[in-house]
Image (cartoon, rainbow, N blue to C red):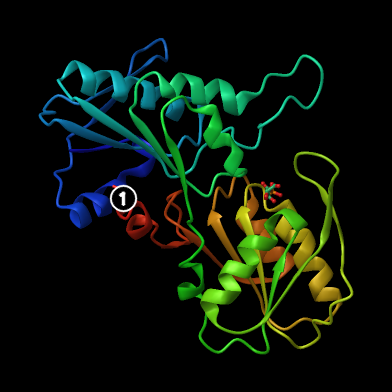
Amino acid sequence: MIVSGSTSQVLAATLSRELGEPLASVEYDRFPDGELLASVPGFDADRAIIVASTVSSDAHLEVLQLQDAVREAGASEVVTVLPYMGYARQDRAFETGHPISARAVARAISTGTDRVLTVTPHEEAVCSFFDPPATAIDGERHLADALPSALENPIFLAPDEGAIDLAETVRDAYGTGDVDYFEKTRRSGTDVEIAPSDVSVASRDVVVIDDIVATGGTVAEATAVLERRNAGHVYVACVHPLLVRTAYQRLAAAGVHDIVGTDTIERPVSTVSVAPSIVDQL
Ligand code: R5P
C-alpha cells in the first residue's frame, strides 16, 4: 500500500496509479497542545511505501509516526520515499557546536524503515547517513520536457558550480544549448552575491537551473545579472520548488519569464512528475 504524508498527497496518488498498489487512507490530526497524530486506520498490506517530503519539522514527525503505524498494522516491509529530504543542506557542522542535522534526521528515519529513496538530495553523500540502504534518484532528467520547444540559442546556467551537473543533464535532455555557471557567495539566508562568468547572453534565452529554489534569492540575483546583460527570456528550472515566503514575487520582480519544477514539493509550478523515476526503483 502507498501511504502518503500530508505534504505529498498528489505524488502518492500518482505512484499508486502507476504501481497499481492501493492508496492507504491516512488521517492527519493534531491535539490541542499541538502534538501531531498521523494514522492509517485501514492499513492492510505486507509492504508499505511511505511517500512524504520532509519540508517541515512536522513533516519529519509525521514520517516517524507513519512508519510506526504501518509496523503496528503488520507491514513486514517499509520503504520510505522522501521526494524532498529536508535538512539535507545541513550536511556538516558549519561551526563548533553545530549538529550535522542531515545525519540526525536520517538516523531517526532509519529506525522505522528497510529502505530509503530520495530524489536529488542536495548532496548525494547524505544517503550514507541512513543505516538501511538509501538511494538517490535523479529528479532532473524530465525538467527539459516542461521548457518551450523553441528556445532562442539557449544557454543552461547553474547559479553556482555545484549545480553544473544538473545544468548539463537538463541541456542534454533538451538536446541543444551551452552550459555555464556563475560564482555564488552567500551573504545571509536570503541574500547572495553572484559573480557573472564571461559568457555572452545577449538576446539568448537562458534557463537557470538549481536543485532547490527556496527564498528565490539565488535565482533572482542570477536573473538580475542576466537582465543587465540583455539576455532574452529567463526561465527557471528546479527539482524542488520550495518557494518559501515571497519567493514568487521576488522571481517575478527580477524578470523571470517562467518557472518549472517537479512534484517533489507540491506547488503550482510542479508540472514535472518524478513518479516514473521513483517507480523504476520500486
Ligand atoms: C544551495 O546551494 C542550493 O543549491 C540552492 O542554490 C539554494 O538552496 C537556493 O536557496 P535560495 O532560493 O534561498 O537562494
The local secondary structure at tag 1 comes to: helix
The residue depicted at 78 percent of the width and 63 percent of the height is 222
The residue depicted at 38 percent of the width and 60 percent of the height is 273
Residue 40 horizontal side relative to residue 67, left or right:
left
| Amino acid type shown at disc 1 | Val
Q: Position of residue 30 (x, y in %)?
A: 34, 19
Residue 113 horizontal side relative to residue 21, left or right:
right
Residue matched to label 1: 10
Residue 250 horizontal side relative to residue 25, left or right:
right
The residue depicted at 81 percent of the width and 85 percent of the height is 202
What is the total number of numbered labels drawn onto the structure image? 1
Query: Can residue 29 be seen at all in this image of the molecule?
Result: no
Query: Can residue 159 be seen at all in this image of the molecule?
Result: yes
Residue 69 horizontal side relative to residue 108, left or right:
left
State which quadrant residue 49 falls in: top left
Q: Position of residue 118 (x, y in %)?
A: 45, 43
State which quadrant residue 179 falls in: bottom right
Q: Is residue 172 above or below residue 23?
A: below
